[in-house]
Image (tube, helix red, strand yellow):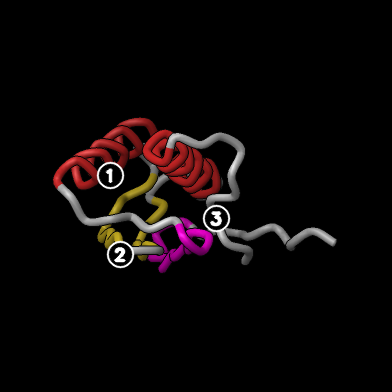
Amino acid sequence: MGHPRRKFVHNRAYFVTNRLAEGLPLVPAKIINKLLLGLLARASVRYRDITICHWLFLANHYHSILVPTGDPAQMTHFMNFINGELAKYICALLGKNHIKVWAQR
């Protein structure tokens, strides 16, 4: 059975977190930081209706505080973009394809 759809409210802050599958760390390094900051910059330009208040990347997960200032439905597209691009980065850095990157909800 699928998960119920999330409904987001205009101008309300949301605490979002996501965890990588076991054994796939986001190792702190200058190149990783540049990739992650570049990804956030591209996402903020692409989805202007989402305000990034805070973002914290840790070894195997991230936390963020996001506010939909325009269309609240853009929140789902924004998170899909971030998670998809991060998955591509991780697969490229590990040199593997078709691996499970994100842990179950």
- Report x, y in % for residue 94: 42, 41
Q: Is residue 56 left or right of residue 77?
A: left
Q: Magenta residues, as a range? A: 10-23
- Report x, y in % for residue 58: 30, 64
First in residue order: circle 2 vs circle 1: 1
Q: Is residue 2 left or right of residue 50?
A: right
Please identify the quarter of the rendering in which residue 104 is found: bottom right
Residue 58 is marked as 2
Q: Identify the residue shown where x is 48% and y is 46%.
A: 83
Where is mark 1, residue-wise? 36
Q: Is residue 15 left or right of residue 9?
A: left
Mark-to-mark CA distance, 2 and 1: 11 Å
SS at mark 3 in the image: loop
Residue 84 is marked as none
- Report x, y in % for residue 88: 46, 36
| Quadrant the N terminus occupies | bottom right
Q: Identify the residue shown where x is 28% and y is 56%.
A: 27
| Quadrant the C terminus occupies | bottom right
Mark-to-mark CA distance, 3 and 2: 14 Å
Where is mark 3, residue-wise? 102
- Looking at the rendered structure, the kind of residue marked 1 is Leu
- Looking at the rendered structure, the kind of residue marked 2 is Leu
- Pointers 3 and 1 in contact (CB under 8 A)? no
Which is more toward the observer, 12 or 89? 89
